Amino acid sequence: GENVEQHPSTLSVQEGDSAVIKCTYSDSASNYFPWYKQELGKRPQLIIDIRSNVGEKKDQRIAVTLNKTAKHFSLHITETQPEDSAVYFCAASKGAGKSTFGDGTTLTVKP
Amino acid sequence: GAVVSQHPSWVICKSGTSVKIECRSLDFQATTMFWYRQFPKQSLMLMATSNEGSKATYEQGVEKDKFLINHASLTLSTLTVTSAHPEDSSFYICSARIGGAGDTQYFGPGTRLTVL
C-alpha cells in the first residue's frame, strides 16, 4: 500500500520567516495530495490541496509544490504568524480512495 | 458548506461497557465516511472505511467485532466501541467525502473517549 513520509517532525521558525514541510509518497498512482492543519484538540482542517496534473498551487501565504517524478510534495508557508502554529499533516490518495497520512509536523512560530 | 458533526464530543465510561459515536454530514450527502483513531501527538490512523448501505472495510489489525461500524444513511455513520477497555481510550475522528465530488475529506470535531 501507500506509504507517506513527512519531514521534519518539528519545526520552529521566527515570526515572518518561511516554513517548508516535505512529504514523499511511494505509490505512483496517487493523484491527490491535501494538506491539513490541526490545532490542539481540534479537527484537521484542509488548508490546500493539489492534484497530480498540477505542479504548483498557491493561496495567499500558502503554496504547495508537487514533483511527480520524484514522488514528493511540499508545503510552503511565507510570512509566518503565531497563529500558524499547529500540527500539519500531508496525505496522498488515489481517485476516490482512502488517504494515507504523514506523521505530522509540529510548527511553532515564535513572536 | 461541508460541515461534519460528531456526537458526543467526549465520553467517559467504565471498562466493559459499549460506547456509540455518531458522525453526521450536516449539509451534504456522504457516500463514504472514514473513521480514524488518533493518539496524543501522533498521526491519524485509519480504522475503517464506511460506505452507505454496505459493510465497512476495516484496516489490517482493526478488530471489526470490537469496533462496529454502521452507515445506515447518506448522512450518518456510527462507530460502536464494544466492551471498551482502558487501551481503547483515544481521540476518534470521522471524516466524510462528498459523493462524486472528488477526494476532499471533511473532518468531524472528534470524540475523546476515556475508559476507566
Image (cartoon, rainbow, N blue to C red):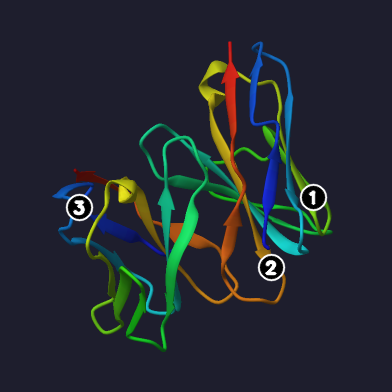
The quadrant of the image that shows the C terminus of chain B is top right
Name the side, left or right, on which B52 lies relative to B43: right
Residue B44 lies, in percent from the top left, at 46, 46
SS category of the residue bearing label 2: strand
The residue nearer to you, when weighing A84 against B40, is A84
The quadrant of the image that shows the N terminus of chain B is bottom right
The image quadrant of residue A49 is bottom left
Q: Please tell me how crowded label 1 is: few (under 14), some (14-19), or many (20+) other residues with Cα within 10 Å.
A: many
Q: Please tell me how crowded label 3 is: few (under 14), some (14-19), or many (20+) other residues with Cα within 10 Å.
A: some
Residue wearing tag 2: B98
The image quadrant of residue A70 is bottom left
Residue wearing tag 1: B76
* Position above or below: A55 against A22: below
- Kindly check if marks 3 and 1 are in contact, taking CB atoms under 8 A apart as contact: no
User: Which residue is most to the bottom?
Assistant: A53
Q: Amino acid at mark 3?
A: Pro
Q: Amino acid at mark 1?
A: Leu
Q: Amino acid at mark 2?
A: Ile
